[in-house]
Each structure stands twice: as structure tokens, then as C-alpha cells.
Image (tube, rainbow, N blue to C red):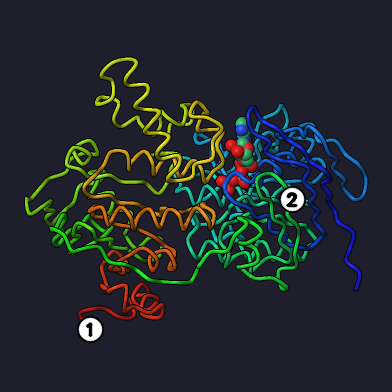
Amino acid sequence: MTEPNPTLRLKGIVKTFPGVRALDGVDFDVRPGEVHALMGENGAGKSTLMKILAGVYHPDEGQIFIDDRPVVIRSPIEAKEHGITLIHQELSLAEEMSVAENIFLGELPRKKWGFVDWKTLDERVGTILQKLNADWGPRTRIGSLSIAKQQMCEIARALTHSAKIVVFDEPTASLTDAEKVVLFDVIEDLKAEGVGIVYISHRMEEIFKITDRISVLRDGSYRGTLNTRETDEDEITQMMIGRSLELHRRNIEHAEEGEEVLSVEGLSCGRLFQDVSFTVKAGEIVGFYGLVGAGRTEMAETLFGLRRPTAGKIRLAGEEVHIGSPSEAIEKGISLVPENRKEQGLVLGMNCRDNITLPQIDDLTAGPFVANGAEVAIYDMYRDRLQIKAPTWRTLVGSLSGGNQQKIVIGKWLSMKPRLLIVDEPTRGIDVGSKSEIHKLLRELAHQGYAIIVVSSEMPEVLHVSDRIIAMHNGRITRTFSADAVTEEDLIQAISGLTSDKAA
Ligand SMILES: Nc1ncnc2c1ncn2[C@@H]1O[C@H](COP(=O)(O)OP(=O)(O)OP(=O)(O)O)[C@@H](O)[C@H]1O
Ligand SMILES: [Mg+2]
């Protein structure tokens, strides 16, 4: 069988930024009706390559062919005219506008004298939202939707402009399982219509489930393309990071049992979660596993003073505490690495060093010279430990790749040396190599005596880092497991609410 000619071909693409050769002669092509995965570590150049395709950046060298004709894509508008749609890794919606306005931005249907034709707009957007199973309407304000729902709106926007090539840059990072199913259906439909799809994700299960071919970048250079059916996780990992990882081995060395750091009794917060009781000791990692919406993030936010509990007690080292705000939480030695790094974790217009040392500014401003050196030293330490890829400490965080931004957030909260560290989805958007580094780092921290709570929706992750695993379903704890004894099956049943400790 001969393969169809590619719709799109990129040849010898080179792109440099100050201090970084982001792409070093990359080849890439997409055939009609295929899903082509683009993989590589954080900072490998995936988003940059796709931004070149979408007219956001201009290549220094190289050529782009569409249907075998050379083209120059000078702007996002020109990209759209060529039938190329990019769904960005970073959301790019206007928060104050409605869903409908965002979807038809710049080309709203008009009536006579230029008035917006709201009726047509609502109808057209309504149809698309229905297709996506959305429970919100065309007039909803974007800013009032969760990140996941905003992401779906971004996808809706792409679907309205009949495209030849659709690029999804880490679309599932913040989607629930149900939303993922919808997304994969949408991708199937696009495939059937002959659209070529580029799919960027760090999640291997997804890659092997929905893609036809996989291309790999490492440090801006092209490492090759394989048929998905003829390769496996190990081979791809090897191509991405140049070594293999023991991905599936689970062998937790428990730290020596320490004092009880946190004890939570009957904690509730309205309808978000109820009657949650558990303890965390120094040296222990407790993993909270459940589906998106099970109440885990809300529970973590309550411990960090972002929400007020409606019932229950929180004790730190045996003493009952009331945590009225994040600054009180920090004062009491609690840190939270939030789920959504952009909104709660980072100042994008600030450099790497300052983002990491920001929380300790008071301690460090002893003298102008001393402070500066100390800050750089702290930054250097976390850069090495977390393998942060940035040209210098002066680099603005906003110009780092998505995964490297996540590492900066983790560094920031670690640098405060908390007693209790809460990390919510610690490796979302992080590549396999760095992921295992972050897991190792969390285990090390446990051995140093930190008490740690890890909230995660990824089963391998909770299995890899936790000493104990607490399963939640619909706002309640269903079961608690020792990580040594638990099976995947136990966990699935517990988070679906099929089993509980009480019943057992
Ligand atoms: N606007 C920019 N200015 C300066 N450097 C940039 C800019 N955009 C990207 N880079 C750099 O180019 C390199 C490639 O980044 P890119 O965002 O393409 O990585 P990625 O493969 O998408 O990573 P991730 O998986 O973390 O999203 C990185 O070193 C990044 O810091
Ligand atoms: Mg990226």
C-alpha cells in the first residue's frame, strides 16, 4: 500500500532565540487523516515548531510545503487561510468575552450596519458546543469557566474553521476523563474527514491509543519518525532522552517513621468534600488518588487556607490550628504547589531566579550584595536538582517551555522549606525523564523528614511516590491503602466508589 502524499511538510527548520537554538534543522510531515504525535522532553522544541507552522514565529531557515507547494506563513491569519489551526498549550482566550465571541473572534457574523448577528452566532456556537457535550452556553463569560472548559472552548474555536491541519499542543493536561473521551471522539471525526492532526502530549498511554505515527525531537534536533504500531514506550523514551528508564519498577524505600505532622478529623467544606479524616507523619508521602472532581484539590486548598472548612479539625504537630489564609498557612509551615501554575504559581514577566526566591524576599534582603549572590545560589541549586532548562537565571519565566515553568513552581515552594508540602498534580505537562526526577526528589524530601501530600490523577504517579494511598470518590474518602500492598484494580474500584473501608 502506498501512503498518501503528506498535506504538510516541514523541511530543515531552524529557529534560534537569544541563547537557545530551539530548532536545529527539523523535518516533519503530516498526512491527510493521520494523527501524528510530536514528542520530546520539556524544551525540546515541540511548541516552537508548531508556532512556526501557525505563523506565530518565523523560521531562520527551512521550508514549508502544503500539498507539495512551497509556502511562506507570515502570520496566524495566513496560517488560517492555509487551513492550519493550532490549539495552544497556553490558553489564549479573552477572559472578559463570552464563549461565542471568543470562538468567532474577528469574524463575528454581522447584520446590516455592522451590528453583530447574535441569533446566528448563538445558533452556530450552540451546535458546536452540543457536539462537545458542553454544559455551558454561547453567552457564558470565558473567565467564569474552569480551565478544562476553557480548553474545550479553544477546541470549539478550532472546529469552526474548517481546517486541513489541526495541532493539539498538550490538550489533555487539564481535562477530566469524560472530557478526554469527547476530545478523542472529536479527533476521530476530524480524521475521518481527512484532516491531518498533530498531537503533542507527554502521556504515553494517549500517544499509543490515538496516534498513527510518532516523531521525536531531542534538544531541537530531529531524531526520527516511527509507526506507532511498530514501536513501544521504551524505544520512544530512549529516543527522547537518550537512555531508558525503569518506568514500571515500584520499590518504595520507606523513610523512618517520624512524628505526626498533620492530623485532619472530620473535615468538610460544604458540598465539595465531607468528613475527611487522615494523618501524615514526617517522612511520609500520602497520595490522594481519585477522578477529577472527587474533592482532592478542594481539600488541599482548605489545608492551605484558600477555603474555609464548614466542619472538622486540623491539627499541626498535635495542636489545633485555624488556617485563615495562604499567608497563615505558609507561616505555619504549609506549602501548596498548585494545580494551575499560570494562575497561582508564577510571575511570567519575572526572571527564573526571582520566581524561585520570591517567597523568601524578606529573609534574603539583608544587604544588596549578599542577597543577590544568595539568591543566585538558591536558584542554581534548584536548577540542578530539578534540571531546569533555561539559558540563565535572568531568563523570563514566560519564555520557558511549559514543563520547565512547572519545575520553577516546584522550586519556588521547596525553597521555603515547609514542614508539610502539598503538591497538586506535580508532573502535569512534564516529560518522562523529568517526571521520574521529580518523583525521586519527592522521595528524597520524605527521607529528609518532610511530610508530603501528593494529589494526582495519574495512577502510576501515586503508585511511584506514595507510602500510603487514600482514594476519594464524590467528596469522601473511600479507602486507605498501604502502597506496598495495593493493586491497580483495588484503586480503580475505590475511586469509582465501588468499595469502601467501612464495607470491607
Ligand atoms: N519566545 C521565546 N523566547 C526565548 N526562548 C524561547 C521562546 N520560546 C521558546 N523558547 C525556548 O526554546 C526552547 C524550546 O521550547 P518549546 O516551548 O518549543 O519546548 P517544548 O518542546 O514545547 O517543551 P514542553 O514540553 O515543556 O512544552 C526552550 O529552550 C525555550 O526556553
Ligand atoms: Mg510545549
Picture quadrant of residue 358 = top left
In the rendered structure, the answer to whether residue 176 lies left or right of residue 231 reads: left
In the rendered structure, the answer to whether residue 3 lies left or right of residue 45 reads: right
Q: Position of residue 91 (x, y in %)?
A: 55, 42
Please tell me how crowded label 1 is: few (under 14), some (14-19), or many (20+) other residues with Cα within 10 Å: few
Q: CA distance from mark 2 to mark 1?
A: 54 Å
In the rendered structure, the answer to whether residue 174 lies left or right of residue 298 reads: right
> Viewer-proximal residue, 313 or 445?
445
Query: Which residue does the image show at 90% across and 74% down from the upper left?
Result: 1
The residue type indicated by label 2 comes to: Tyr
Picture quadrant of residue 118 = top right
- The residue furthest bottom is 504
Q: Position of residue 45 (x, y in %)?
A: 66, 44
In the rendered structure, the answer to whether residue 36 lies left or right of residue 455 reads: right
| Mark before the other along the chain sequence, 2 or 1 | 2
For disc 2, the marked residue is 222
Q: Identify the disc placed on residue 380.
A: none
Which image quarter is the C terminus in? bottom left
Query: Which residue does the image show at 57% across and 57% down from the upper left?
Result: 202
> Viewer-proximal residue, 247 or 294?
247
For disc 1, the marked residue is 503
Give the vertical position of 279 relative to 110 (above or below): below
Which secondary structure, mark 1?
loop
Query: Which residue does the image show at 56% across and 39% down from the upper left?
Result: 93
Which secondary structure, mark 2?
strand
Please tell me how crowded label 2 is: few (under 14), some (14-19), or many (20+) other residues with Cα within 10 Å: many
Q: From where the camera sits, is residue 88 visible?
A: no
> Viewer-proximal residue, 484 or 151?
484
Q: Are marks 2 and 1 in contact (CB under 8 Å)?
A: no
Q: From where the camera sits, is residue 37 visible?
A: yes
Q: Position of residue 283 (x, y in %)?
A: 23, 58
